[in-house]
Structure formats: structure tokens, C-alpha cells
Amino acid sequence: MSLQFTNKQITWGLFTLAIIAYLLPWTVNVGNSLTMGAYDFAEWLSKRPFDDTSYNTVMIMRGQLILLTALIMFSLEQPSLTKSWWAIVITGVILLIAQLPAPNAILDTNDVNRQQQVYLTGISFIIFLVSLTGFFSRYRNISWLIIAIIGIASTIYALTNAISMMQAYQLPAQIGVGAILFILTYIILGMLAIRGLLKSFRG
């Protein structure tokens, strides 16, 4: 007897796994005690001098929270005000708060690092608002596939650049379990999306 999971259960499962992976170490440097999750890693990199590569790397590592916001919010169906609906909305609000910079950063146009956080939070906020209509739930598999492709490509790009930047500061580092698990979550998401699309094409 095989277990059957609903779309919402699968979404919550993958979302939870991705959040855990995001918080787990993405880089391990035992000698210098630099063991950081994705968000802390992005903060550490943002303290280094900014150029195009470092700016994009930090943006992508922070931007994974946009993809996670999309993953959970896109599962919203038309407003029903059920416990499940409210759980998703509250989770989306928590993610938005987690992405916010300090309040004074909103008006500080000279701080490139903090302004980046403002822009990313703005994108998440737009995703949050549009998702409240339930529009994206009708295109779950396509949405999952797009999130998975962007997530895998961007994570590998950011992680490769981040490790290289650490090595440039004479800080040899290894890829942590968090980064591996995060990419694996996207791969599972993509495979489920492809399976769902194939099913729909076959009728």
C-alpha cells in the first residue's frame, strides 16, 4: 500500500526541507570557525568590498528567500480563510519580515548593500500580493519547474563564486551540508514538476 500525499503536503514538506537547508552550514572552514548558513554567508560576503561578482553573489544567496516565498505562496488557492490558507499567509508574512533590512536602510540610498535588501523584499512583497488571488495555484507544476531551474542554477553560481571569494582571502572552505541539501530540494521539486506536467499532457 503506497502512501499518497496531497499537493499541499508536498509543498509544505519541500518548503520545510528548504528552510532547514538554508539555515544549515553552506560553507565549512574549521580552522577559522567560519561555518555559516546561506543568510549569514551573504552577510559575511556583504562586508567585503563590493564589485559586480560579489554584489550578484550576495543578491542570489539572499534571493533564495524570494524563491521560497514563491514556493509556499504559489500553493494558495482562491481566498478561503481556512486554517490552511492562514498558515500559508502567515508563513509568507514571516518570510517578508525576515528579508527586511533595518528601517533606516529604506531611505539610505548610499548603502548599496541595504538597498539590495530593500529591492529583494519588494519583489517578495509583489509575489506575496499576487499570490493572494490564488492565480498561481492553477499553474503549480510550471511554477515548481521554473522555481527549481532558477534555484539550482543560481545556487550553484552563487556558491561557486562565494567559495572563490573566501579562498581569495586565504580562507579555504568546503561546501557544507546545507548547500547540498538545498540543491537536492530543488532537484526533487523539479522532478515532481516534470512528473506532474507529463501526467497532465497524457490526460
Image (cartoon, grey):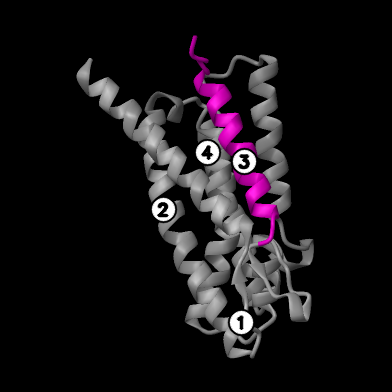
Q: Nearer the viewer, mark 1 or mark 2?
A: 1
Task: Confirm or deny contact between disc 1 and disc 3 (CB under 8 A).
Answer: no
Q: In the image, what residue type sits under mark 4?
A: Leu
Q: In the image, what residue type sits under mark 2?
A: Ile
**Dividing the picture into quarters, in which one does residue 102 lie?**
bottom right
Query: In what element is the residue under mark 4?
Result: helix
Task: Confirm or deny contact between disc 2 and disc 3 (CB under 8 A).
Answer: no
Query: In what element is the residue under mark 2?
Result: helix
Q: Earlier in the sequence, mark 2 or mark 3?
A: 3
Reading the image, the residue beneath label 3 is: 17
Q: Earlier in the sequence, mark 1 or mark 4?
A: 4
Q: Few, some or many C-alpha atoms within 10 Å of disc 3 (few <14, some 14-19, many ≥20)? A: some
Reading the image, the residue beneath label 4 is: 71
Q: In the image, what residue type sits under mark 1?
A: Met
What x and y, as percent, mark residue 54? 54, 78
Mark 4–mark 2 Cα distance, whole angstroms, equals: 12 Å
Q: Earlier in the sequence, mark 3 or mark 4?
A: 3
Residue 150 image label: 2
Query: In what element is the residue under mark 3?
Result: helix
For residue 123, say whether it is visible: no
Magenta span contains residue 12: yes
Reading the image, the residue beneath label 1 is: 166
Q: Few, some or many C-alpha atoms within 10 Å of disc 1 (few <14, some 14-19, many ≥20)? A: some
Q: Which residues are magenta?
A: 1-25
Mark 1–mark 2 Cα distance, whole angstroms, equals: 24 Å
